[in-house]
Structure formats: C-alpha cells, structure tokens
Amino acid sequence: MTEKERSDLSQIHIDACDLGTYAIGMLRDSIDAFERADTQQAHDVCERKVELKKRFIAVEESMFRHLALYQPVARDMREIVASLRIIYNFERIGRMGYDIGDTIKTLSQCCGLADPEKLIIVGRKVLAMIEDAFDAFRDRDVAPIRNMRERDSEIDRLYCEVMRDLIRRMEQKRDDVPILARYIIIDRYLERLGDQACNIAEMTTYMVTGERVEII
C-alpha cells in the first residue's frame, strides 16, 4: 500500500467516525428530550437531519472513490466494505433520533407526556449498546462488543415487556390512548436501534478479525 492510499484510508475512517459521532449525538439528544419533555431540544434534533444526510453522502462517496482508485484487497478491502455497511447504520441511527424527536414534537402538540419511565430505561440501554459498538469500530477493538448478543436479548425482552404494559394501559385508560400509541412507536424505534448496534458489532468484528459472526 502506498503512503497516499494509507493516508486516504485513514481519513475515511476518521470521517466515518465523525459521522457516527454526529448520528449518535442526535439519538442521545432525542432520548434526553424525551426524558425531560423538552420540545425545543426535540426540534433541534430534527433540524440536524439535513446535515446528517450531507455528511453521510460525503463519506459514502469517499469510500466509493477509494474503491475505484485503488481497488484494495485483503484487509484493506475488508475495512472499506465493512465501513461502508457501518455508515449506513450510522445514518439510520441519526434518522431514528430524528424520528423520536419528531414524535416528541407531535406528542407536545396533541397529547402531552405520561410516565415514560420504562421507555427511558430501554433508551439508555440501547444508547449504551450503540456507543460501545461505535467505540469498537473507532478503536478497531472487539472487546466492547463481546457480549452484544446478550444485551440485544435483554432489549428484545424489555421491548416486549414495555409493549405489553402499554397495551394494558391503553385498555385501562382510554383517554391516554393517543399518547400511549406513540409510545408504542418509540418502543419499536428503540428495538430497531438495538439491531443497528448489533449490525455495527457484526461488521466491526469482520473488519478487525475477518470472522463473520451473526448476533441477531
């Protein structure tokens, strides 16, 4: 590998990590906004969607350009291919941060908030999974993601538990149905975000070790 190729590949990794940081920041802020019923923060998250897309496209194009110019092989090819798939997950994480923020805005306009404590617990656990998956990718170190399968199973369990609780509350308190129906949407977003963390973990493992693992 030439020095120019090495420099380009290093910059691609830096840019991918910057995208991940931006996307995870959107999710973190949307969960914070949900916990505090902060509609202004939710609005601010939604305003960042355009910048998220802009950053995603720029990193994606740099990866395509690297593939076309250098036609990497072996480990370098693994890194580009894995990174390309990982940035798609980063973009989805940011978009779901936007979706949660948008749902909070809708709640504030029509319904208000009612006891989201269990959803906040799930959100914090999912965020921790995503942050660990990101750290593993950034540092090229699989140690933070070794127990990802067990953590995803816990999220699946909590998702079902929260869903059952929300349905029970909808049956008992008809007036809260508009709020609780949107909580169900957020619960689903969080479960899917757990899958995004697992996808990043799978691709990071492949990038670092060459091993293909299936977490979900």
Image (spheres, helix red, strand yellow):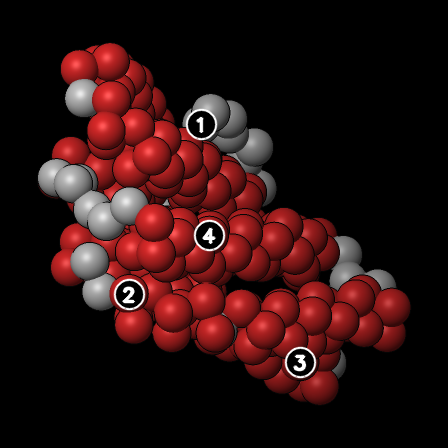
Q: CA distance from mark 1 to mark 2?
A: 35 Å
Image position of 30 (left or right of 79): left
Where is residue 37 drawn, in percent x and y? 20, 58
User: What residue is shown at x 76% (from left), y 56% (from top)?
Assistant: 73
Q: State the residue in front, 162 or 156.
A: 162
Which of pointers 4 and 1 lies earlier in the amino acid sequence?
4
Residue picked out by circle 1: 215
Q: Marks 3 and 4: which is nearer the front?
A: 4
The residue beneath circle 4 is: 99
- What is the C-alpha distance between the residues marked 2 and 3? 41 Å
Secondary structure at badge 2 equals: helix
Q: Choose the circle earlier in sequence order: 2 or 4.
A: 2
Q: Earlier in the sequence, mark 1 or mark 2?
A: 2
> Gap between marks 2 and 4, in whole Å?
13 Å
Residue identified by numbered label 3: 8
Question: Which quadrant holds the N terminus?
Answer: bottom right
> Is 118 left, or right, of 2 in this rendering?
left
Residue type marked 3: Asp
